[in-house]
């Protein structure tokens, strides 16, 4: 079992920045591929970014490429999402997730564990 707790969400103006964190605990969380997803009201949950558990390979959705950066600190079992140049369409609940596979997956079903989410609201 892996437990995930997100933090760092909030209200920010368009063009601003936020840094989300996800604290992981439990069964060797540093060996899991990690991802960030988001879900806006009335929409399906969508992939934002993922990072491998070794080597730091990252993969991004086209909508956030160049603006968001995913990173992880395996020594502290913490995942981050640096979000810059935020847009109103980035407003959503952001979730971190852990996947026991080696490849970075962009589909929800590949992830085994989920956090409770943190709200990000970007005002225009």
Image (cartoon, rainbow, N blue to C red):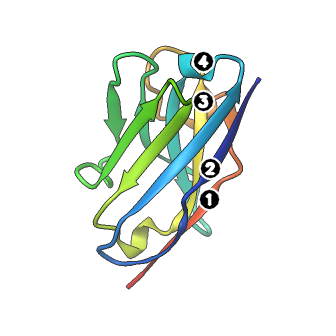
Q: Is residue 99 above or below residue 35?
A: above
Label 4, residues with CA under 10 Å away: few <14, some 14-19, many ≥20: some
The numbered dot on residue 100 is 4
- Reading the image, the residue beneath label 2 is 6
Comes first in the chain, label 3 or label 2: 2
Extreme residue in the left direction: 66
Q: Secondary structure at mark 2?
A: strand
Cβ–Cβ below 8 Å for labels 1 and 2?
yes
- 57 over 39 or under it: above or below: above
Q: Residue 7: image x %, image y %?
A: 60, 55
Residue linked to disc 3: 98
SS type, badge 3: strand
Residue 61 place in picture, x, y as percent: 35, 45
Q: Along the polypeptide, which appears first: circle 1 or circle 4?
A: 4
Q: Specify whether 114 is left or right of 65.
A: right
Q: Which residue is mark 1?
A: 118
């Amino acid at each position: 079992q892996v437990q995930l707790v997100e933090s760092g969400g909030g209200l920010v103006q368009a063009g601003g920045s936020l840094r989300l964190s996800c604290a992981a605990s439990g069964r060797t969380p540093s060996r899991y591929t990690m991802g960030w997803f988001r879900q806006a009201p009335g929409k399906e949950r969508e992939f934002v970014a993922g990072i491998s558990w070794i080597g730091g390979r990252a993969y991004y959705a086209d909508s956030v490429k160049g603006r968001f950066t995913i990173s992880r600190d395996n020594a502290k079992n913490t995942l981050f999402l640096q979000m810059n140049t935020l847009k109103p369409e980035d407003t959503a609940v952001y979730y971190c997730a852990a996947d026991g596979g080696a490849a970075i997956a962009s589909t929800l079903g590949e992830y085994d564990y989920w956090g409770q989410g943190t709200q990000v609201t970007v005002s225009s």
